[in-house]
Every structure is written in C-alpha cells, then in structure tokens.
Amino acid sequence: MAKRIDVSGLNAFYGNFRAVEDISMTVEPRSVTAFIGPSGCGKSTFLRTLNRMHEVVPGARVEGKVLLDNEDLYGNGVDPVAVRRTVGMVFQRPNPFPTMSIKENVAAGLKLNGVRNKKLVDEAVERSLIGANLWNEVKDRLDRPGAGLSGGQQQRLCIARAIAVEPQVLLMDEPCSALDPISTLAIEDLIGTLKEQFTIVIVTHNMQQAARVSDRTAFFNLSAVGQPGRLIEIDSTEKIFSNPSVQATEDYISGRFG
C-alpha cells in the first residue's frame, strides 16, 4: 500500500553545517514528485532524510518530522533498517552486487529479511523483474552475474531489487544520469507504471525529465554558496513549468542560472 509523506520543519546537518533548512512538504501516495534545482542545493541530502540514509554519514543528523501515514520515522524506538525496507532507494549509478547472479541480486533483500522459502523467493524474483520490465530480457539467464548486464538493464535490476521487498515508497536519486537516452526512456516509462503501486520521489537535474514523469515538482535553491538549501516552492508540475509563483523558480526553469 503506497503511503503519504508529510515533512515538517526539517533541517539536515553534516556536523555543524546545516545542509537543508526548514523544509515542509507533503508527498501524495501513488504519485511522482520530482526535486529540481542547481547542484549543491540539498535535493539529494533531503531525499536521503526520507528513509534515514542521511544519518549513515558520520556526524550527520536530522531535526524535524518525517511522517509516513502519520508515523514519525524519527520517533523513539523506530528502527532505521525497518524504515529502509518501507522506503526503498535507487541510486544515481547502477549498483548491482558484483559477485551475485541476477536472481541473487533481486532476492538479496528478501534473504536479509529472513525469507528462505524457495518458492516464495522465486515468485518474488519473477514478480519484481516483471515489475521492473526486465523479465523478458533476463528470464533465461537468471544465474548469470548481474554486473554483466548493460547499464540500463543494471539500473532496472536495481529497481527490481528495491521493489522485491514490497516497499511503500520508492526514492530515486538521479536514476538516469549515467544512462544513454534509450535506457533513460525505458526507466521513465517504468516510473509511470510503478506509480500505480508506489509513492515515488525522484531527484533529477534534467528538467525535461521532471516535466515528463512527475505529477508535482519541488524547486530547491540556496541563497549563496555555503548557505543551506531551501524549498522555494512545490506545486503541480504543469504549474511549476508554465506559471511558477516565485521569480527564482522561473529564472531557473528558463535557464537564467543553474
């Protein structure tokens, strides 16, 4: 079941440096929300606060609230590992486990969660590869190394791995930046399909991609180098790209900076 995210008053720090400041937003279930903005404005840092990956960095911490269907992900006693099972993540560069086969890559999270039944694992692997639109390409070579696939196939394998544990939210940090145009189109088509089942948040430097795949777009910026990133505005993607409410958003989208 896809879940709604409500963020209020969120600040993210690396040591004493505040990377993002006072961010509040709602991400609706079964939708795609895109984060855009210039490099260094905190998009990826903020994305990683949504599944508690930010605090993996030594000295990193978060203040504020992230509610997943009204459950505070930073509440007392909440297990960060359990959060990451519920809120999956796909990274910028495809990162299949190099020593594992295609099947083992998809099943890795299931095995970590203690699923040992071969029939259940096989069903989940097939279902996830179908969901990632990769099954027909790999079904006859599941025992071959995942690292032997093309870049675009590797990224879809990583998406299959992420959805195999049945998360409610899928975070994607520039999932197409290392891919060729044909592979990028395949991932974009896949995002459109996956949103029927998941809540999706994507960071992208490609504004055309944000316009193509997202329902809502959030524009981030920073007032000066060394200052924290801030959410400038969030609205329907159509409005952000056609009639933004803030001049800085219009300046960025029209290419005046960034």
Image (cartoon, helix red, strand yellow):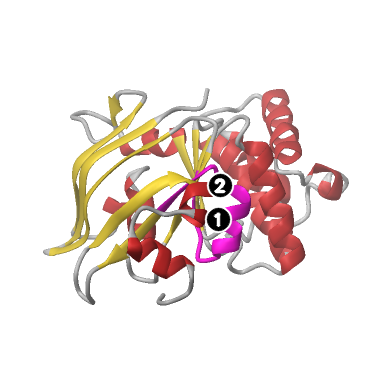
**Residue under pointer 1:** 210
Image quarter (top left, top right, bottom left or bottom right) of the C terminus: bottom left
Residue 49, placed above or below residue 40: above
Residue 25, placed above or below residue 249: above
Query: What amino acid does circle 2 point to?
Result: Ser
**Residue under pointer 2:** 214
Q: Secondary structure at mark 1?
A: helix
> What's drawn in magenta, residue-wise?
201-218
Q: Position of residue 109 (x, y in %)?
A: 54, 39
Q: Quadrant of residue 96?
A: bottom right
Residue drawn at 52 percent across, 22 percent down: 1
Residue 83, placed above or below residue 40: above
Residue drawn at 49 percent across, 30 percent down: 29
Which one is in front, 234 or 242?
Answer: 242
Near mark 2 (Cα within 10 A), the count class, few <14, some 14-19 or many ≥20, is many
Residue 233 visible within the image: yes
Q: Quadrant of residue 120?
A: top right
Which one is in front, 184 or 241?
Answer: 241
Q: CA distance from mark 1 to mark 2?
A: 6 Å
Looking at the image, do the residues carrying marks 1 and 2 touch, with CB atoms under 8 Å apart? yes
Q: Position of residue 87 (x, y in %)?
A: 44, 38
Residue 149 visible within the image: no
